[in-house]
Image (spheres, rainbow, N blue to C red):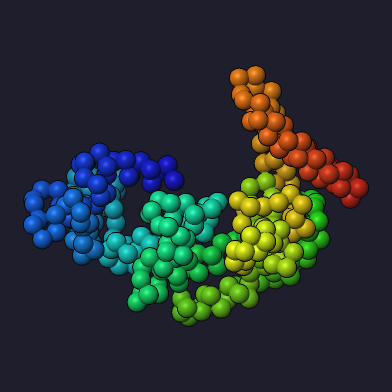
Amino acid sequence: MDVVHAAIALAESLHELPLLFPSSLVSAHHERPSSANARKGTTMNDDIQDLISWINSGFRRADGADAIPADPAGRIYATRFRRTLARFIVRRPRGLIAAALQYGHVDTKVTLSYAGNEDPAWLQDIAVEKLELIIDQIEEDSRRLESGEHVSGPSAQEYRDRVAQSAPFAGRAVAGVRNAERLLEQADPAVHHGQGMTCVWRAATAACRKAKLALGLPGADAPDEADCRSTCVNLAYTDRDITELQQELVQLQADAADPLAPQPRRDRAAAQAAQHLTIIERHRDSATEDGRGIA
């Protein structure tokens, strides 16, 4: 995301107008003033081609080829960058929420449907990216279990079972993008790797979902890491999760001992550190019982 931030900062430095891509920087438009109107999609497509031509006119590769070669998939146009956004939404922690905040959407549903009801390709991009993530995740989880990765927590065995059931999936040809959603339903083991935890999703036992229902809110069909509860029976902890918790534990212990921090903050850090330490020790104890040792 640092590359994205740098690119946005560069675009912002080019002008002082409120929109990142205003309708024009060099001439005034009475019908579409730059202070309130963004650049049209067709114009942005031409801008992209002009930028590529300008770069290729001044820079060459070592073999004399264009610095930006022609894309085998065809002409580069603005809507193709939706796939990049879809990838970040699917693969980054809380990616959908981050995207909604970045675009100023009042709800994540707006982000998912921002391309408009007449163009369903955006949701298809999301489905394809999620399918690719699931396939990569199944392969990685299966490889790590075969290599001896230990898993603890109330849903440890369910995690192993789901990964084992999903591992034989060797791929399938998808003739159309719309088929990705159907294939996703068949291949998805509903295992979600979060920050220092793994959720083996079951709606009926999900603590985050129960908390929403208790408040009269609609229950989600996926875990909400922001509302995760340590007592949830859907939780499992891999060696990867424990490594993250160990790193967080060092910072939490330092925060708890910081004499300059307010007492409530120190108390909160101490409570979180104790919780992390309990999970780490239980993971180590169960690994010892299974005849496996972890660092």
Residue 21 at least partly seen: yes
**Closer to us: 3 or 155:** 155
Please give left or right for residue 280 compared with residue 248 in the image. right
Residue 190 position (above or below residue 38): below
Please give left or right for residue 188 compared with residue 43 in the image. right
Residue 248 percent location from the top left of the image:
66, 36
Rendered residue at 10%/48% (across/down): 26
Q: Quadrant of the C terminus?
A: top right
Residue 108 percent location from the top left of the image:
47, 60
Determine which quarter of the picture holds residue 213. Answer: bottom right
Residue 200 position (above or below residue 185): above
Total numbered labels: 0
Rendered residue at 74%/49% (across/down): 230
Determine which quarter of the picture holds residue 264. Answer: top right
Rendered residue at 81%/61% (across/down): 157
**Closer to us: 61 or 30:** 30
Please give left or right for residue 197 compared with residue 118 in the image. right
Residue 191 at least partly seen: no
**Closer to us: 25 or 205:** 205
Rendered residue at 49%/57% (across/down): 96
Residue 291 position (above or below residue 248): below
Residue found farthest to the top: 259
Residue 278 percent location from the top left of the image:
80, 40
**Closer to us: 263 or 119:** 263
